[in-house]
Amino acid sequence: MSAETHLAKFSVTVQQASSFIFSHTDQPEIIFNKAAEFAVTTEMLSEITGFSTELIGDYFSTRGFDTSELDQTSILINADLGDFNSLVSFNEREGLLSNESLRGVVQEALQQSSIDTTAYDAVFGPQFAFQDDDDIYDAEELGVTGLGDVPATNESIESLFYGSLINQFSALDQFEVSQIIPFPVSERGNSEDFQVFVSEALSDVPLAVVWTENELAGLVAREAAILITELVDDSSIVGVLDHSFLGFAVA
């Protein structure tokens, strides 16, 4: 999304934003915090100021700010999905794999970690207050180009969360899962080998889903509980799928 289109959500022009930035160049913390508040990314700052993203990164880093934090704004995932776009979809399953059924299993598991239904629900809310002002989430707000606009509700994000986890496990076979599941959760993001493995595994889709409904529901519920626990405990994780297998595959 262009800076002009994004700023228009707040009735702000590019010229107004530019004037604000150049009037505060000696106060980088004000510029950074304002950009973070309104989900203005490094690329948008580049459009507004005319400076390259590299120069902007250097400007902030020499003053103790990390511009990568500005680029984590999307509700679902904060990386280019490329050929994996099709793995993100709504959950339209019934029975054990329905949103209602999975929610019940996951919430019961989370209660053992003292994560209540309020915290569970908050995970599927907007990352920024303005994102649901118009009652829809657009592609920029979701981080996925192939979805189009979706209703700005917690139920929408929850359905996309479970649907995407179902798609991810459906793309894996028994051997791949046997290698992925035992891998320490805390080390997933630090291991290039893990990221390469899940990327290759998700690319090599079996001709047919190898899991029974019961097996698939168990795998999805287990992984959902892990991801939601991380999202509740670590506010630096923004997208609900950022730490999923898919998130690491495209990181």
Image (cartoon, rainbow, N blue to C red):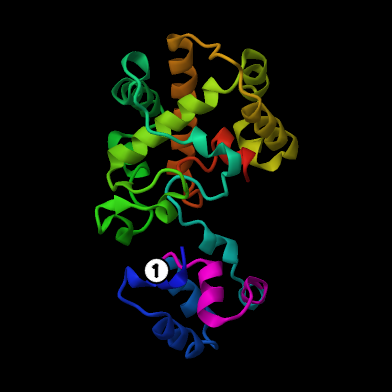
How many labels were placed on the picture?
1
The amino acid type of the residue labelled 1 equals Thr
Magenta-span inclusion, residue 161 = no
- Left or right, residue 16 beside residue 71: left
Decide which of 238, 208 is in the foreground and name it: 208
Q: Position of residue 246 (x, y in %)?
A: 57, 36
For mark 1, what is the residue?
Answer: 5
Q: Secondary structure at mark 1?
A: helix
Q: Residue at x 52, y 50 (%)?
A: 78
Around disc 1, counting alpha carbons within 10 Å, would you say few (fewer than 14), some (14 to 19), or many (20 or more)?
Answer: few
- Left or right, residue 118 beside residue 228: left
Which quadrant of the view contains residue 14? Answer: bottom left
Decide which of 125, 138 is in the foreground and name it: 138
Q: Is residue 237 shown above or below 159?
A: below
Q: Is residue 231 shown above or below 164?
A: below
Magenta span: helix, strand or loop, mainly?
Answer: helix
Q: Residue at x 48, y 78 (%)?
A: 31
Q: Position of residue 223 (x, y in %)?
A: 50, 27
Decide which of 32, 143 is in the foreground and name it: 143
Magenta-span inclusion, residue 53 = yes
Q: Is residue 149 shown above or below 18?
A: above
Segment colored magenta: 38-57
Q: Residue furthest right?
A: 193
Decide which of 245, 120 is in the foreground and name it: 245
Q: Residue at x 39, y 23 (%)?
A: 109
Q: Position of residue 72 (x, y in %)?
A: 51, 56
Which quadrant of the view contains residue 67? Answer: bottom right
